[in-house]
């Protein structure tokens, strides 16, 4: 399959909430340096500890940012959806990747190398401030995850995660809130810091109460207001 043309990549950059703030000449220069990569569902995009020399923007699909312990237990830090960026920490400090990035669905990502993007950032305080804001939001989310695991009951963590995932996946779509979450129960368990078996017990209770519907790879929210009462 042929990759995006020069014109396609220029339009992608112009429409992006962050990179679209560059001038037309700067965007044109970045088009030359950028590349589009495709990953099948389940494929590794980068591994924790690998050199962090690029930032990526999701053109389509969903990417999971996670970490796996020596015993094989996984914790999910974030799910990155279409239009969002990831790899910004490695871009800014040039250090190692702080987590694993994996394609949950078939994905296309736009890749920008640190050596090419940093000169533009040095001349754009507004973009740097937006990157700082993104980093702060993700740090707050990570801190909130730690607090939730320590202080919230599992039922409350599941309810909160379902509503947050619905809101994230619905950004920019008509209607405001997605009702169909395309993730497995194991992936949800990794997000809330529990076992699949424990999460399944609570999901079955929620399904019997007509709050959700369960399918093989999907969780459909039927009563968001009632789920919110569980938080």
Image (cartoon, helix red, strand yellow):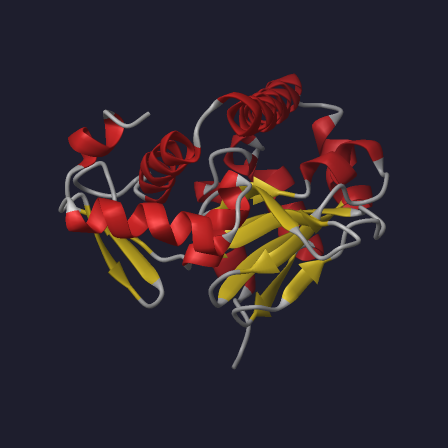
Which residue corresponds to the image point at 36% horizontal and 65% vertical from the top-left? 217
Compared with 192, 38 (above or below) is below
Image location (x, y in percent) of residue 198: 44, 49
Residue 226 picture quarter: top left
Q: Which of 180 and 35 is in front in this view?
A: 180
Asked whether 204 or 44 is in front, the reply is 204
> Where residue 119 sits in the image (x, y, percent)?
78, 33
Say which residue appears at 64% left-offset and 21% top-offset: 132
Which residue occupies 32% across, 60% down?
218
Residue lying at the far bottom of the rendered structure: 1
Q: Is residue 140 above or below residue 29?
A: above
Is 227 in front, or is 63?
Answer: 227
Q: Can residue 14 be seen here?
A: yes
Left or right: 74 as drawn, with respect to 96: left
In the rendered view of the protein, which quadrant contains the C terminus? top left
Q: How many marks?
A: 0
Q: Where is residue 167 in the image (x, y as percent from the top left)?
A: 32, 36
Judged left or right of residue 176, residue 77 is right
Query: Is residue 134 left or right of 95 when viewed as pictured?
Result: left
Residue 230 location (% of width, % of height):
28, 28
Q: Which of 123 and 158 is in front in this view?
A: 158
Task: Note whether 216 is above or below 143 in the view shown.
Answer: below
Say if residue 11 shows up in the picture: no
**Residue depicted at x 47% and y 64%:** 105
Q: Is residue 48 above or below residue 108?
A: above
């Amino acid at each position: 399959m042929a990759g995006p043309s020069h014109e396609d990549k220029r339009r992608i950059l112009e429409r992006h909430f962050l990179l679209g703030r560059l001038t037309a000449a700067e965007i044109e220069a970045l088009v030359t340096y950028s590349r589009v990569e495709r990953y099948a569902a389940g494929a590794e995009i980068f591994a924790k500890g690998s050199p962090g020399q690029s930032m990526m923007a999701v053109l389509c699909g969903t990417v999971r940012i996670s970490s796996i312990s020596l015993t094989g237990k996984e914790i999910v830090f974030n799910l990155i959806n279409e239009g969002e960026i990831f790899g910004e920490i490695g871009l800014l400090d040039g250090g190692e990747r702080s987590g694993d990035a994996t394609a949950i669905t078939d994905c296309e990502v736009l890749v920008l190398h640190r050596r090419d993007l940093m000169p533009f950032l040095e001349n754009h305080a507004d973009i740097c401030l937006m990157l700082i804001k993104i980093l702060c939001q993700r740090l707050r989310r990570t801190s909130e995850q730690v607090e939730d695991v320590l202080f919230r009951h599992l039922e409350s963590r599941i309810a909160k995660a379902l509503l947050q995932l619905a809101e994230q996946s619905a950004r920019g779509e008509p209607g405001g809130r997605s009702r169909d979450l395309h993730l497995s129960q194991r992936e949800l368990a990794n997000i809330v810091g529990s076992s699949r078996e424990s999460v399944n017990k609570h999901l079955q209770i929620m399904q019997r109460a007509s709050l959700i519907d369960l399918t093989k790879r999907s969780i459909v929210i039927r009563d968001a207001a009632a789920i919110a009462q569980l938080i």
